[in-house]
Image: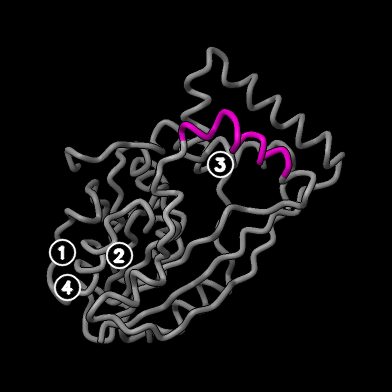
């Protein structure tokens, strides 16, 4: 693990695994459509978290390498993906043989990385015509009443715990376009509406870097999350909360 790496999600690894929704099937289908079956020898999932994407890649590639610098998060990958090759190292400092990877995925993680260094690694690792898939989403939306509850938390207790990288003006689209050696072949918005209970929606926020960090500063974090759940339920009633987790997918090939 890099000596400069600061774990942000490890203390919330259980919540991350329990409450983070999977990505929609259409997203995976679009990615695999760009990687012919005869070129599915090796995939890398960098910034792999608890292995949400790694789990999908396993049955589709001969070898899958999950790169995750946080040991607590990587332990979740090991539990659910025993076939994965796990590297507990940052994506900037990871080593991989040149031109040895057919697909690299970066899911909701590039904003945490030094994009210039990571994309230089990606270009070096990909085989000719290998594919990079980067997908991310804005903050989830759940309707005006529910969103008003989360806005109060963003403006109040969570504010001091949000890493500045989450507020960067530059986008990963621009960073990929600027990377010499990659050519964007597809940009698409993938709709993804998830039905969640008030409890699960509060649980999602407990898996964020800032929500979990704030809760750890409290004497009784369980009471805080229970109160947030109650506030969501007060505005949503007994109905499920419809949460928009739509993603922007960028597919690029090594040129």
- The mark that comes first in sequence, 2 or 1, is 2
Give the mark nearer the N terminus: 3 vs 2. 3
Crowd rating for badge 1 (residues with CA inside 10 Å; few <14, some 14–19, many 20+): some
Structural crowding at the residue carrying mark 3, measured as other residues with C-alpha within 10 Å and reported as few (<14), some (14–19) or many (≥20)? some
Which of pointers 4 and 3 lies earlier in the amino acid sequence? 3
Query: Separation of disc 4 and disc 1 at Cα?
Result: 9 Å
SS category of the residue bearing label 4 = helix
Answer yes or no: do the residues labelled 3 and 2 have beta carbons within 8 Å?
A: no
- Kindly state the secondary structure of the residue where label 3 is placed: helix
Q: Looking at the image, do the residues carrying marks 4 and 1 touch, with CB atoms under 8 Å apart?
A: yes
> Magenta segment, which residues?
148-161
Residue at (48, 62) in percent of width and height:
136
Q: Which residue is mark 1?
A: 96
Which secondary structure, mark 1? loop
Asked if labels 3 and 4 touch by Cβ distance under 8 angstroms, the answer is: no
User: Which residue is painted at 41% across and 41% down in the image?
Assistant: 163
Q: Which residue is mark 2?
A: 44
The percent coordinates of residue 67 (x first, y second) are 28, 54
The residues bearing labels 1 and 3 have C-alpha atoms spaced at a distance of 31 Å
Residue 124 is tagged as: 4
């Amino acid at each position: 693990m890099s000596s400069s790496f600061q774990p942000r999600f490890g203390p919330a690894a259980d919540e991350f695994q329990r409450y983070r929704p999977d990505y929609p099937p259409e997203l995976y289908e679009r990615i695999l459509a760009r990687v012919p079956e005869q070129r599915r020898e090796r995939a890398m999932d960098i910034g792999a978290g608890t292995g949400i994407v790694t789990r999908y890649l396993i049955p589709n590639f001969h070898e899958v390498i999950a790169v995750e610098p946080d040991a607590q998060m990587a332990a979740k990958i090991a539990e659910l993906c025993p076939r994965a090759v796990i590297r507990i190292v940052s994506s900037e400092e990871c080593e991989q043989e040149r031109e040895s990877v057919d697909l690299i995925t970066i899911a909701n993680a590039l904003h945490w990385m030094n994009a210039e260094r990571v994309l230089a690694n990606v270009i070096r690792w990909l085989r000719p015509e290998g594919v990079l898939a980067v997908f991310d989403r804005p903050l989830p939306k759940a309707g005006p009443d529910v969103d008003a509850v989360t806005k109060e938390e963003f403006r109040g207790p969570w504010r001091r715990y949000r890493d500045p990288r989450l507020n960067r003006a530059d986008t990963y689209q621009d960073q990929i376009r600027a990377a010499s050696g990659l050519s964007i072949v597809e940009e698409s918005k993938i709709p993804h509406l998830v039905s969640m209970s008030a409890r699960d929606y509060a649980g999602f926020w407990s898996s964020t870097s800032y929500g979990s960090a704030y809760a750890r500063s409290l004497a009784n974090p369980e009471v805080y999350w229970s109160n947030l759940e109650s506030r969501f339920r007060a505005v949503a009633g007994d109905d499920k909360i419809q949460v928009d987790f739509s993603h922007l997918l960028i597919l690029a090939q090594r040129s």
